[in-house]
Amino acid sequence: MAHLYYGSETGPAEIPDRILAHVKVVATTKLRRGESFLLTWRHCDPDAPGRTSIWMQPSIPLRFVFANPDPEPLDGEYLRDLANQANSSGGIVLEWADEAALLAEPAFAPAPAAEVARREAGELVAA
């Protein structure tokens, strides 16, 4: 599980690595443009049910910590879906079923949209 640290919260949100990697690209792109958005997820811990929503804005500190040292492969279609959600009034709503769908995908080369988003986020790695 990856961890999302936001603002002055001492404890991180636990989000699957593959999903948080996609959120990271969308969030950094929007925040760099000065655009705020809502991010919502269900808690992963079955002993602490519920959900959390946070207002993502450029002035609040944000840190992404991943369990896997290697970058996760990005899915262009999922990036576009998250970007569209981020532009809506409901914001991004993370579903853990998304992780299962991403993991079921065969290995793939990043789509052109994913490459653009990664370049904008400063993470494009030379092949």
Image: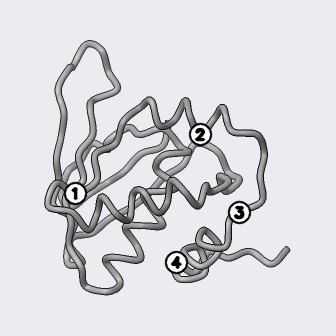
In front of the other: 124 or 112: 112
Residue 101 x %, y %: 56, 34
Label located before the other in sequence (1 or 2): 1
Residue 51 x %, y %: 19, 33
Query: Mark 1 to mark 2: distance in Å?
Result: 20 Å
- Say above or below: 29 vs 106: below
Label located before the other in sequence (2 or 3): 2
Residue 81 x %, y %: 42, 56
The residue pinned by badge 1 equals 91
- Determine the secondary structure under disc 4: loop
Label located before the other in sequence (2 or 4): 2
* Disc number placed over residue 102 in the picture, else none: 2
The residue pinned by badge 4 equals 121
- Determine the secondary structure under disc 3: loop
The residue pinned by badge 3 equals 110
In front of the other: 127 or 13: 127
Residue kind at label 3, given as amino acid type? Pro
- Say above or below: 49 vs 110: above
Residue kind at label 2, given as amino acid type? Leu
Q: Tell me: 33 left or right of 67.
A: left
Taking the spot 77% from the left edge, 59% from the top edge, the residue there is 109
Residue kind at label 4, given as amino acid type? Ala
